[in-house]
């Protein structure tokens, strides 16, 4: 169906989150930017969590062995198809023999390539998503390699031409304002550190993976001796080790941790974490849980109107 | 006895209960999981977190209210697992530091660690990572200030008065004392995890 010619820095198959296994220590995994993946799937009329390619920092090329319909969303400016170029956020008709190339994006981190019907992948613990540390899902639980061959689940052609509405296309410019609430151990921060957490701009450090993102620029040193009793953490949890440099957890993050949980990225903005890259700027906007739920309901209503609509429209 | 269980909101989509012991946490988590109202129910050592879809907030609050008088009944089935461990050297690069912190010789520390009666209190962090109690409560080993970006599968660490075992390679913040040879996580098995909460563990030096 399609053969990987250049896997890029890290390309994995990702589908639904691995739900209901965190008490066994198995992370959600799934897409780092769930919204971009949902938008890609929507264009080719898949379930919004059908299995896609998650491509990190571009550098990706694949050769298609038959006609099919794809869509690319997330980071990036264009999709190159043999000699042509197509924009993101629209269905693209691929002919047998075409080569599809995704270049390194100017900003943002991850691109999502959906194929009509979804990619075949190994299901483990209820999901096809690749979780590399435990070799789960995808293809042998690893990043894709040269000459890997991927197959669609069924007929990969879709005759309708679709575009994501302009107003719903996420836009990445290296600056993120993320809504966040206080969390279980926020009170371990001094008043000044708490002020700094919610009112300053952090820089994403060199560690920016599917597990977590280091935030640099402000030392928050919590009043903890580094021996807090291990407690549950989730994607969105912001931990603060004794070094004072916060870490925001993402989709592959551990399920419990022993560092103070000083804040939590609101559910409505977590998808953006998957697009932050080293050097990007992140600012946290304080919300109460009640405000954050209102934000989430508003965003969901807006998106569901498109994501869950009848694809014939 | 019914403890007063008042959950705290620690995120827009997470409630957290605080309890007395890890056994109480495991039992409460099982009770909460049986409600089938949450996306995830995860036990910490003395906490239980419940993540939910905020669209279902009212339903979640109702469900949590019913748990108020839950009778927490930890299971009394006890199983013992023997783990073969190599202490120190390249497998336990922090053993010397821990010995200095506890005022023990390496031989005395190893003797103590192999003779303690250990219990798995919690599984978490990464697949199969086990938090194991049994060391003297006077132990107060701090975590590393900066976590290692990679520790090997089977690595055994000590933090506070707990022993922790990394079932998979990955980042880790626990000072390391050695490495076990047993396979701790097998995704192809019907019982993918060797260790589970409540088990007794014996370390055998090899």
Image (cartoon, coloured by chain):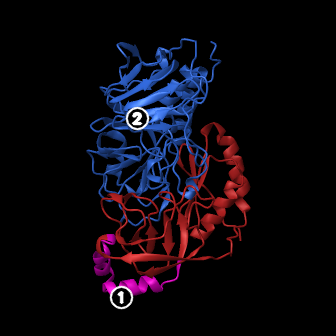
Chain colours: A blue, B red
From the viewer's perspective, is residue A173 above or below residue B49? above
Disc 2 versus disc 1: nearer the observer = 2
Question: Is circle 2 on the same chain as circle 1?
Answer: no
Q: What stretch is highlighted in magenta?
A: B91-118
Residue labelled with disc 2: A147
In the rendered image, the quadrant that contains the C terminus of chain A is top right
**A25 in magenta:** no
Residue labelled with disc 1: B108
> Mark 2 — on which chain does it sit?
A
Given residues A42 and A4, the one toward you in this image is A4
Q: Residue at x 60, y 23 (%)?
A: A155
> Mark 1 — on which chain does it sit?
B
**In the drawing, does residue B72 fall left or right of residue A223?**
right
Q: Residues within 10 Å of mark 2 (few under 14, many from 20)?
A: some
**In the drawing, does residue A2 fall left or right of residue A223?**
right
Q: How crowded is mark 1: few (under 14 residues within 10 Å), some or many (20 or more)?
A: few
From the viewer's perspective, is residue B91 above or below residue B138? above
From the viewer's perspective, is residue B112 above or below residue B196? below
Disc assigned to residue B47: none
Q: Is the magenta stretch mostly helix, strand or loop?
A: helix
Q: Position of residue B90 (x, y in %)?
A: 29, 71
Q: Which residue is drawn at 70% across and 43% down?
A: B59
Q: Is disc 2 in contact with disc 1, using a CB cutoff of under 8 Å? A: no
User: Can residue A111 be seen from the camera position used here?
Assistant: no
Q: What element carries label 2?
A: loop
Q: Residue at x 74, y 54 (%)?
A: B66
């Amino acid at each position: 169906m399609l053969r990987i010619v250049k896997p890029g820095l890290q390309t994995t198959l990702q589908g639904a989150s691995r739900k209901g296994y965190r008490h066994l220590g198995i992370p959600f995994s799934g897409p780092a930017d769930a919204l971009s993946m949902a938008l890609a799937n929507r264009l080719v009329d898949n379930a919004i969590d059908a299995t896609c390619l998650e491509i990190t920092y571009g550098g990706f090329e694949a050769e298609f062995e038959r006609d099919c319909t794809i869509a690319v969303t997330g980071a990036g400016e264009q999709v190159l198809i043999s000699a042509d170029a197509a924009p993101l956020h629209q269905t693209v008709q691929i002919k047998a023999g075409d080569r599809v190339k995704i270049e390194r994006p100017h900003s943002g981190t991850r691109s999502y390539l959906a194929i009509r019907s979804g990619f075949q992948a190994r299901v483990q613990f209820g999901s096809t998503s690749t979780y590399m540390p435990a070799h789960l899902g995808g293809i042998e639980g690893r990043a894709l390699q040269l000459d890997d061959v991927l197959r669609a689940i069924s007929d990969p052609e879709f005759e309708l031409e679709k575009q994501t509405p302009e107003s719903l296309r996420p836009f990445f410019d290296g600056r993120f304002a993320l809504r966040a609430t206080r969390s279980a151990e926020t009170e371990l921060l001094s008043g000044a550190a708490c002020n700094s957490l919610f009112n300053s701009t952090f820089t994403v450090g060199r560690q920016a993976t599917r597990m977590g993102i280091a935030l640099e620029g402000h030392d928050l040193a919590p009043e903890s001796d580094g021996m807090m009793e291990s407690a549950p953490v989730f994607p969105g949890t912001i931990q603060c080790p004794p070094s004072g440099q916060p870490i925001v957890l993402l989709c592959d993050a551990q399920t419990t941790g022993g560092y103070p949980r000083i804040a939590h990225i609101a559910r409505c903005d977590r998808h953006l974490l998957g697009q932050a890259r080293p050097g990007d700027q992140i600012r946290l906007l304080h919300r109460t849980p009640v405000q954050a739920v209102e934000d989430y309901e508003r965003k969901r209503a807006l998106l569901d109107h498109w994501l869950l609509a009848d694809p014939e429209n | 006895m019914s403890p007063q269980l008042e959950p705290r909101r620690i995120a827009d989509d997470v409630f957290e209960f605080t309890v007395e012991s890890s056994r109480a946490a495991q039992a409460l988590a099982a009770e909460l999981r049986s409600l089938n109202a949450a996306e995830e129910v995860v036990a910490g050592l003395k906490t239980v977190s419940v993540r939910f879809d905020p669209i279902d907030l009212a339903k979640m609050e109702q469900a949590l209210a019913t748990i108020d008088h839950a009778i927490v009944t930890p299971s009394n089935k006890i199983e013992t697992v023997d783990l073969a461990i190599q202490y120190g050297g390249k497998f336990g690069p922090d053993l010397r530091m821990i010995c200095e912190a506890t005022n023990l010789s390496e031989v005395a520390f190893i003797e103590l660690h192999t003779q303690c009666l250990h219990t798995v209190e919690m599984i978490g962090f990464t697949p199969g990572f086990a938090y194991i109690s049994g060391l003297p409560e006077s132990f107060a080993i701090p975590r590393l200030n900066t976590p290692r970006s990679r520790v090997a599968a089977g690595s055994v660490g000590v933090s506070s008065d707990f022993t922790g075992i990394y079932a998979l390679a990955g980042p880790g913040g626990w000072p390391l004392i050695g490495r076990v040879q047993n396979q701790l996580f097998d995704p192809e098995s019907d019982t993918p995890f060797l260790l589970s909460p409540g088990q007794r563990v014996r370390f055998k030096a090899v």
